[in-house]
Amino acid sequence: MDQDKLTVALHEVVDPKVGVSIIDLGLVYHIQVEGGRVDIRMTMTTPACPLPESIRMGMETAIQRHLPEITEVYIEVVWDPPWHPGRMSERAKRQLGWFGQ
């Protein structure tokens, strides 16, 4: 299983509050694939994020659609280290208008 394929699939998952991919936001900290199982460690932009279940469901749907060989998806939301804007990709910064930051 190629982790790059998984990352491409997760690029489709958008944080509905800001309209940017969870990958580009830097919310995904770790991906491990073993057989038909994937373990993902991620965070949210804030502990008060109102949509974690929506994001989780989007992740599971994207993985099932692109990687049907994955039969188990385990997503762990962590708060350490905390998310910060420096984790965003250049594309995310452009989308959000964070020029030169």
Image (cartoon, grey):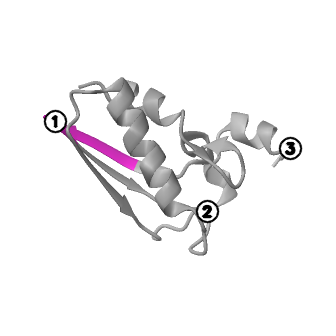
Amino acid type at image mark 1: Gly
Q: Does the magenta stretch include residue 90?
A: no
Give the residue pinned by disc 2. 45
Q: Name the residue tied to disc 3.
A: 97
Magenta extent: 30-37
- Residue count near mark 3 (Cα–Cα under 10 Å), binned few <14, some 14–19, many ≥20: few
Looking at the picture, how far across and down is residue 76, in whole percent? 34, 61
Q: Which residue is drawn at 65% across and 39% down?
A: 89
Do tag 1 and tag 2 residues touch (Cβ < 8 Å)?
no
In the image, residue 77 above or below residue 33: below
List the single residue furthest toward the left: 35
Q: Residue 7's image quarter?
A: top left
The numbered mark, 2 or 3, whose residue comes first in the sequence reads 2
The answer to which image quadrant residue 95 occupies is: top right
Residue at image coords 76%, 42%: 93
Q: Residue 17 carries which label?
A: none
Please say if 20 is above or below 53. above
Nearer-N-terminus badge (1/2): 1
User: Where does label 1 land, which residue?
Assistant: 36
| 2 displayed left or right of 23 | left
Q: Establish if 10 lies above or below 53.
A: above
**Magenta part, dominant SS:** strand
Q: Which residue lies furthest to the bottom in this view?
A: 48
Q: Do the residues labelled 2 and 3 touch (CB within 8 Å)?
A: no
